[in-house]
Image: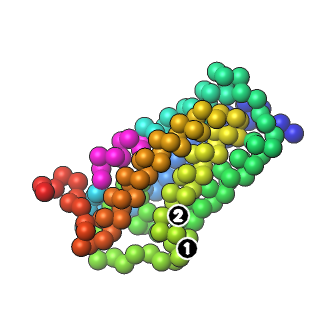
Amino acid sequence: MTLTETSYTVLVLLVAAERFAELAVARRNGAWSRARGAREYGAGHYPVMVVLHTALLLGCLVEPWAADRPFVPLLGWVALALVLAAQALRWWCIGTLGPRWHTRVLIVPDLPLVASGPYRHLRHPNYVAVVVEGAALPLVHTAWLTALAFSLLNAALITVRIRCENSALAPSRALPPTGAVS
């Protein structure tokens, strides 16, 4: 069985639609957090994250067509299974954090860290989902340049993001919030 470019395009568009759903959840959750005194940290890297994730989706659409990438069944079906697993993990994270899940680093003062769901096992499980999906989605249709470029750039971005989150969540080491004077 093969996955056509049309089917792959539909898959990428479904992932894009999922991103818009995430943004709607994040917007609602951001309002909840800000109403409770949340402070934002690391806003400077957020636009880079938006551009990188948009480029991932565009690369997934352009590379298979422009470079005439074939669908390789063993690689494609395994990659698709990983994409689906990453989506399940992402939404498990979103469900576990509830209104505390955001696409930005928003910290509500005096709330304890969440230690249930996937957070029982990992400190940053959502980023596992991001890493897996970012590598696997392009590989569903052999877009290996997109997978490689996203993975390398995302590794640098996630390093910055995790440092920011860890610092913001540790009160004794917290960074000044975005817009604060140091």
The image position of residue 88, as x and y in percent, is 63, 60
The quadrant the N terminus occupies is: top right
Residue 125 in sight: yes
Give the answer, above or below, for where 114 lies relative to 159: below
Foreground residue among 112 and 153: 153
- Whole-angstrom CA distance, mark 2 to mark 1, is 8 Å
Going by the numbered disc 1, the residue's amino acid type is His
Residue, disc 2: 125
Foreground residue among 40 and 143: 143
- Residue drawn at point x = 33 percent, y = 58 percent: 164
The quadrant the C terminus occupies is: bottom left
Going by the numbered disc 2, the residue's amino acid type is Pro
Is 99 on the left or on the right of 71, as rendered?
left
Report which quarter residue 71 is drawn in.
top right
The numbered dot on residue 92 is none
Q: Which residue, as the protein is rendered here, is positioned at the far right? A: 1
Foreground residue among 99 and 74: 74
The numbered dot on residue 121 is 1
Give the answer, above or below, for where 119 lies relative to 42: below
Specify start and end residues of the magenta stretch as a single range. Answer: 42-50
- Residue drawn at point x = 31 percent, y = 64 percent: 167
